[in-house]
Image (cartoon, rainbow, N blue to C red):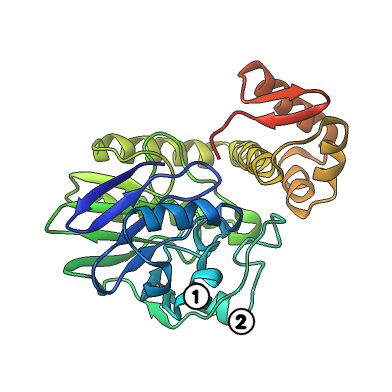
Amino acid sequence: MSAIEIAEDLFFVERGYLNANHFVYRGQEPVLIDTAYVSGFEDTAKAISKLGVDLTRIRLIVNTHSHCDHVGGNRIIQERSGCRIALHALGKHFIDSRDDWATWWRFFDQEAEFFTCHKALEHGEVMRIGPHEFEVIYTPGHASDGIVLYHLRGKILLSSDTLWERDMALINPLVEGSRAVFSMAESIGRLKTLDVRMVYPGHGRPFAGFGSAISRAEARLSGFVENRKRIGNDLLKKIIIYTLLMKRGIEEAAFFGHLMGTVWFRQTVDRYFAGNYEKKYFEIMKDFSRRGIVKSNNGRIFTTVKP
């Protein structure tokens, strides 16, 4: 787990696919941006402590959206520190109303815990993190409450799950509605107007090729619009891998049955692949095995993707 100082006393901490990256400001009033997945909290705490920040002194958590891999440590840290938590206004509503469907937690059978959200962030407002000013930019598509944070002076973009270097965060029309892919395209268009030197994403390493990443995202979204089955395939593949990471592997003979017991798998295959559950499952698993993304050992299957 690596940490990079991206501005004075503000550090980017890279995690993996299951746990979102986060940021730690270690000034007199420490701030966290995103707290990863709940099962990864021990590593989150170690990374924060390694930077010289006492968890009990955290004063503010900012979440870029309310998905479980970004808010997993919120409740524990808030209990220990009494810190305030800020989300986009929609995300605050989801948390305040205990809506574990809009946050995706129940839909995807994910672990997460509710917490107290104190501040609703709005598009265009300027947020101070220590001496650093970040503009809040509303970027729905992947998440209806998604935001990115832009540092004009440093030309730094904390892009969360709105922009990755080569891949794209999944689009989930089953919860977000059929407009999700178009909302994502509008959000990418909003980012396109920014002057960006360096991007620090929600998953993956930092990157300088902002324009190239924007172009790849636009092409990916165009492909989704042209062929809706690509959305279904992308969703199934990403959440199958996410499930294997959450479960830390599973009995191979039981995995299809487990997926059939979830809402997301059945609804996605119903919507995009005419309910051909078994056929779609084995098609994806064969592709994963061929590419070395999923492997089998003593009757258990696991993914080689970094958690």
Residue at mark 2? 97
Give, as a three-letter code, the residue at label 2.
Ser
**Image side of residue 36 versus residue 242, left or right:** left
Look at the image and tell me whether residue 85 can be seen.
yes
Look at the image and tell me whether residue 186 can be seen.
no
Mark seen at residue 80: 1
- Which dot, 2 or 1, sits closer to the camera? 1
Q: In which quarter of the image is residue 289?
A: top right
Q: Residue at x 61, y 18 (%)?
A: 291
Q: What element carries label 1?
A: helix
Q: In which quarter of the image is residue 292?
A: top right
Residue 294 vertical placement versus 209 (above, below): above
Pointer 2 local density, CA inside 10 Å: few below 14, some 14–19, many at least 20: few
Q: Is mark 2 on a helix, strand or loop?
A: loop
Q: In which quarter of the image is residue 284?
A: top right
Q: Residue at x 47, y 50 (%)?
A: 20
Q: In which quarter of the image is the C terminus?
A: top right
Q: How many labels does the image show?
A: 2
Give, as a three-letter code, the residue at label 1.
Arg
Mark 2 or mark 1: name the one nearer the start of the chain: 1
Location of residue 152 in the rendering, given as x and y in whole percent from the top left corner: 15, 59
Location of residue 40 in the rendering, given as x and y in whole percent from the top left corner: 56, 52
